[in-house]
Image (cartoon, rainbow, N blue to C red):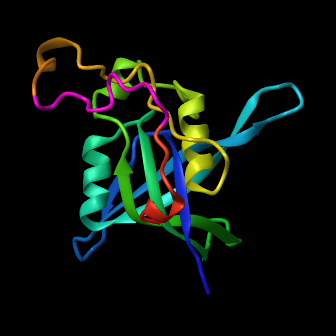
Amino acid sequence: MLNRVVLVGRLTRDPDLRYTPNGIAVANFNIAVNRPFSNQQGEREADFINGVVWRRQAENLANFMRKGSLIGVDGRLQSRTYEGQDGKTVYVTEVVADSIQFLESKNASQDRGGGAPGYQPNQNQFQNQNQSQFGGQGQFQPSPNQNQGQGPSQGQATEDPFRNNGEPIDISDDDLPF
């Protein structure tokens, strides 16, 4: 059997970090994931997905990411039930994250003013990346608003090696780690 989930989205609220009685860190989070199509009015809709992450990654998520931060989640779906305060059974389905990738710097969402849930500054970048990674026809193209070697780093070894190329990056599905 296979139970695997890979999501890219923005946090809709700050992660909620808690500790079990045994001292194990656990963080609950919610991300907005844009749907790959528009509705009848031509608007993009988003799904809001609950997640949980444990131990060191929970602490890192809570310490470095905030509402509006773009993250990648790799994990599995899990369903559980518990009895609510009113005595009724509550059913919960959530993503249990095995790994969380921070897809932008800590200050990027602050520079945007926090960002709105589901906000993506360059829609085509993620759409093309997803098509390329998941067998579609698109190719990933770097965003034009990414660091182009401006400022003090220009001419140094940390300069973007793809800065002047301007060509799409052709990556075979066989070269992807998943």
Verify whether residue 159 appears in magenta: yes
Seen in the picture, residue 154 relative to 117 is either above or below; the reply is above
Identified at 36% across, 52% down, the residue is 101
| Rendering coords of residue 36 (x, y %) | 70, 42
Q: Is residue 12 above or below residue 25?
A: above
- Viewer-nearest residue: 89 or 164: 164
Q: Residue furthest right?
A: 40
Magenta residues, as a range?
Answer: 157-168
Q: Is residue 175 left or right of residue 17?
A: right
Q: Is 54 within the magenta?
A: no
Q: Nearer the viewer, residue 165 or 159?
A: 165
Horizontal side, residue 172 vs residue 154: left or right: right
The residue lying furthest to the bottom in this view is 1
Q: Quadrant of the N terminus?
A: bottom right
Q: Nearer the viewer, residue 136 or 92?
A: 136
Q: Position of residue 138 (x, y in %)?
A: 63, 42
Residue 108, picture quadrant: top left
Classified by dominant secondary structure, the portion drawn in magenta counts as loop
Q: Is residue 178 left or right of residue 158?
A: right
Residue 131: image location, x then y, percent: 62, 47
Q: In the depicted view, which residue is nearer to us: 15 or 174?
A: 174
Residue at the spot 48% in from the left edge and 25% down from the top edge? 115
Percent x, y for residue 139? 56, 41
- Answer above or below: position of 14 versus 110: below
Q: Who's the residue at 62% across and 67% down the image? A: 93
